[in-house]
Amino acid sequence: MVADLQPGEVVIAEKIDRISRLPLPEAERLVASIRAKGARLAVLGVVDLSDLAAEAQGVAKIVLESVQDMLLKLALQMARDDYEDRRERQRQGIELAKDAGKYRGRRADPKRHAQVIALRKSGHSITRTAELAGCSPSQVKRIWAVEVSQAEAVRMGAFREDALTEADAMAAADQEGTKV
């Protein structure tokens, strides 16, 4: 979006939290890149002094621009703090639910897993598999890791019943005792 901006255009954010998910330095860089293109950022609920600053001259212009920057930074930081507080409360709630045995996380999608496995087995890259399956590359990696580890375990015989007879177990124990 920023690359397509033209001088004089206005970027409208419905709420400050649409920008606040970024840490403050990154949000400030985003705002600076919008301004560098000659565009303006308008956020509903944040006082916009840019029209007044454009008409002002001298010290008044500098003061109005500084106040506008301060108000935007303050709003961004408050929204970011609110975002982080919500995330922390969510994490605490999930932890409590896990401790109570009520939280199991998101259920696996067997169709997507089968699709990812089929795409990877047919030779598609992780990125291409993610695009075709409609998921993230990290999810493809997680699904594929489980598939590969299960296949490796089967190949190594981990799922075979290798039960020792009682006599075999006793003989092994006797050999361990005599090696001292």
Image: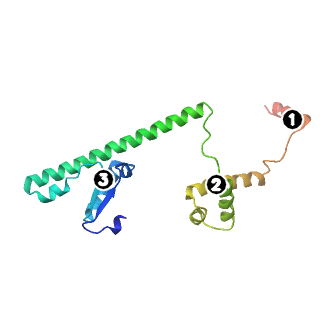
Dot 1 alpha-carbon crowd within 10 angstroms: few under 14, some 14 to 19, many 20 or more? few
Q: Position of residue 152 (x, y in %)?
A: 73, 54
Query: In this figure, which colouring scheme has been used for the structure?
Result: rainbow
Question: Of the numbered discs in the image, which one, if any, rests on residue 169?
Answer: 1
Of the two numbered discs 1 and 2 on the same chain, state the one appearing first in sequence.
Answer: 2
- Residue in view at x 35 percent, y 44 percent: 79
Question: Of the numbered discs in the image, which one, if any, rests on residue 43?
Answer: 3
Whole-number angstrom distance, CA of label 1 to CA of label 2: 38 Å
Vertical arrangement, residue 28 with respect to residue 125, above or below: above
For label 3, the SS is strand
For label 1, the SS is helix
Q: Position of residue 128 (x, y in %)?
A: 58, 66
Q: Quadrant of the C terminus?
A: top right
Q: Choose mark 2 or mark 3, whichever is in front.
A: 3
Question: Of the numbered discs in the image, which one, if any, rests on residue 143?
Answer: 2
Q: Choose mark 3 or mark 1, whichever is in front.
A: 3
Dot 3 alpha-carbon crowd within 10 angstroms: few under 14, some 14 to 19, many 20 or more? some
Q: State the residue in front, 157 or 125.
A: 125
Q: Is residue 19 left or right of residue 125?
A: left
Q: State the residue in front, 172 or 105.
A: 105
Q: State the residue in front, 153 or 8.
A: 8
Q: Is residue 106 left or right of residue 69?
A: right
Whole-number angstrom distance, CA of label 3 to CA of label 1: 74 Å
Q: Residue furthest right?
A: 167
